[in-house]
Image (cartoon, rainbow, N blue to C red):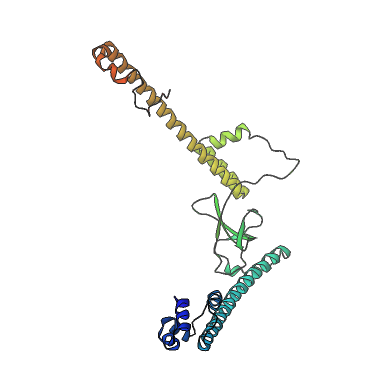
Amino acid sequence: MWQGCIKCAFQHPLATTAAEYHPSATILNENAPMSPNTILSTLAAHDEVPTETLREIITGLVTTIKIRKVAWEADRTAMRAHINYAEDHLDVALQAREDPDFDFDHAGVPNDFVCNNNRVPTFQIPIGEGLYLPAEFIKRDEDDRKKVWGVTGRFGTGEPAYAHKLYAHAVEQPETPTEPLCPWFLRLLQGSTANYSHLREAIEELRDWGLAADIACYREYEDQLWDLNATIHSLRAEAELTKSLLDSCHHHLSAANTHHRLAQLEAVCHGKDCRFPIRGDFSV
């Protein structure tokens, strides 16, 4: 529409007057930004352009340049802040690796958290930009003893706590090969509540949270498996009883000579299996 209006303005004797009242001319007079591609297309379509229109075009292009400069400055500022944030976290990570005696801000560590001291060596906390720091202070979850919470202790009171699943770590000693669990130990794991309580107490004395977590997991999974097997046994017994009742009905129908008394229905199936298609033969 703007290009068509300019073309008419070039050809009509009252071009200047018409341009003053056209909406596009009003926008241009307000120094609205203009696309360089649009300007090139418009100039290429006209051999002669009035001076006033050229002035408005130049003003629009200047406005476009200023707007893009402001946007570029905003992007540059945001990128610089992003880079500074990443550099700060990188400095902290490098300092943690190079200075093991880093002076932690213990005032910023949540209550009841204790020093990790390699108790949970795999607990790494993300600090952004793909960087991680070890959890220097940890606390076992009060409700779920198989989970631990941790903080780095390097970012003050506002640092959030992260959760980590506990599990037993392999003994990395060549002279101590991995062996199957002894029968007596399995009996303790699977035994009575009293025996299991003694086992839990002995594990707590070792102060190995990961080992205690796997002991608890084993006991829970053992109980779940027992419940599932009991359910399977109950369902199997119920299925066998239902099968017996089905056989009894089959015998009664046969004894009553039912198929001969309803022989007129034989043609309904047309020699095909007319049972419901979803049914299957599930043996007990």
Indicate the quadrant containing the C terminus: top left, top right, bottom left or bottom right.
top left
Snapshot quadrant of residue 252? top left
93 sits left or right of 198 in the view: right
Tell me residue 29's x, y (percent). Answer: 47, 86
* Front residue of 72 and 229: 72
What percent of the width, then of the height, locates residue 197? 53, 42
At 58% from the left edge and 66% from the top edge, which residue is drawn? Answer: 109
**18 over 175 or under it: above or below:** below
Q: Quadrant of residue 232?
A: top left
Left or right for 202, reference 2:
right
Q: Is residue 118 above or below residue 52?
A: above
Say which residue appears at 46% left-offset and 77% top-offset: 2
Q: Residue furthest right?
A: 175
Q: Position of residue 209 (x, y in %)?
A: 59, 50
The quadrant holding residue 76 is: bottom right
How many numbered discs sit on the rendered protein? 0
Pick the quarter of the image with the N terminus.
bottom left
Of 135 and 13, nearer the camera is 13
In the rendering, at what x and y percent does residue 5 appear?
44, 79
Which residue is more in the foreground, 279 or 139? 279
Q: Is residue 82 left or right of residue 99?
A: left
**Rendered position, 233 above or below 132:** above
Indicate whether 184 appears above or below 104.
above
Which of 62/216 is in front? 62
